Amino acid sequence: MRARYGVPLSLTAVGAAGLAYAAGIEARSFRLRRVTIPVLPRGMRPLRVLQVSDIHMVSGQRKKQRWLQSLAGLRPDFVVNTGDNLSDPEGVPEVLDALGPLMEFPGTYVFGSNDYYGPKLRNPARYLLEKVQGRHGLNGNPPAVGVVHNPWEELRDAFDAAGWVGLSNARGRLKLEGIEIALTGLDDPHIKRDRYAEVAGGPEEGADLSLAVVHAPYLRSLDAFTADGYPLVLAGHTHGGQLCIPFYGALVTNCDLDTGRVKGLSTHTAGEHTSYLHVSAGCGTNRYTPVRFACPPEATLLTLVERA
């Protein structure tokens, strides 16, 4: 029996151990990444920006709530939330509890598809198939019958009441101590809610810094922001690939961005301009695929410094 079944049984055991690690350990191993980006005018003091993304809160995720609450101890100058806060229509109170201490700081936000709609059980192999076929998201179609509509309005109202600036196809401003930041954002390109024509025109005059924000880093959005001259674009959505291969990296991005820029700091060029792009790997998962491998959940403290 050992000769016939030893190898398959060993592979099964390794697979089970890997799944247990990915679901029980790594998906709960929250960490903070620190990145420095040279985008500020000369003579301006550094700015500390906390980016949180893809929380995908499900009721009962106490460790995630406590970790998010603890990030307020970083005392950022402002917070950027790049969407997909929910993975459960009952998760709004937990999201607001987790982000409550951070909502004491200035902030801004965009929504992602999972803020609007509950997730569906899907075969993970479809992401690879969609990559091969060049298809992503809902391709402009409405969600299928039976998809749960999340109470995103409750999130919006709470964020707005805290003074956070909503950027779903909108512009806004944050005023810090002696510093004014112009913000431009899009609704989620993954479900074709982005309307760049409504915010086109490039950075506004009179601000110390202009910042672009979007949930899913689709190339059409990155091209538009970059061609218009924004020095920095912040995004989420990709989960950093979520299930990565050690020493190789991500297989998919769940959008048309290349896997080489699935997370972290990179650049994007369009027209005569080049922007910095930061994509957060996020701190959650779809409730139906609660695993991460070689891609731990994260938030990022971005330190913006003077341009060289």
Image (cartoon, rainbow, N blue to C red):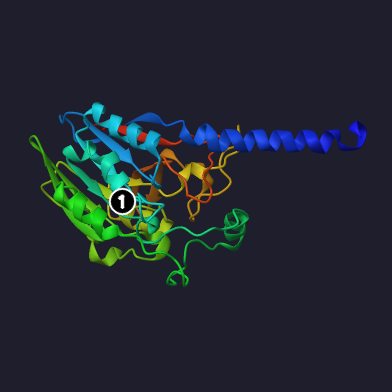
| Residue toward you, 161 or 172 | 161
Q: Secondary structure at mark 1?
A: helix
Residue reaching furthest to the left: 178
Horizontal and vertical percent position of residue 277? 37, 43
Residue 39 location (% of width, % of height):
26, 37
Is the residue 102 above or below the residue 159 in the image?
above
Q: Assign the N terminus to one quadrant of the image.
A: top right
At label 1, which amino acid type do we have? Val
Q: Residue at x 22, y 47 (%)?
A: 108
Q: Nearer the viewer, residue 66 or 230?
A: 66
Residue drawn where x is 36% and y is 59% of the image: 188
Location of the C terminus (image quadrant): top left
Which residue, given by chain and number where applicable, does mark 1 sit on? Answer: 92
Residue name at image x 48 percent, y 42 percent: 240
**Rendered residue at 83%/34% (across/down):** 7
Where residue 176 sits, quadrant-wise, is top left
Does residue 251 appear left or right of residue 67 in this picture?
Answer: right
Classed neighbour count for the residue bearing mark 1: other residues with Cα under 10 Å, few (<14), some (14–19), many (≥20): many
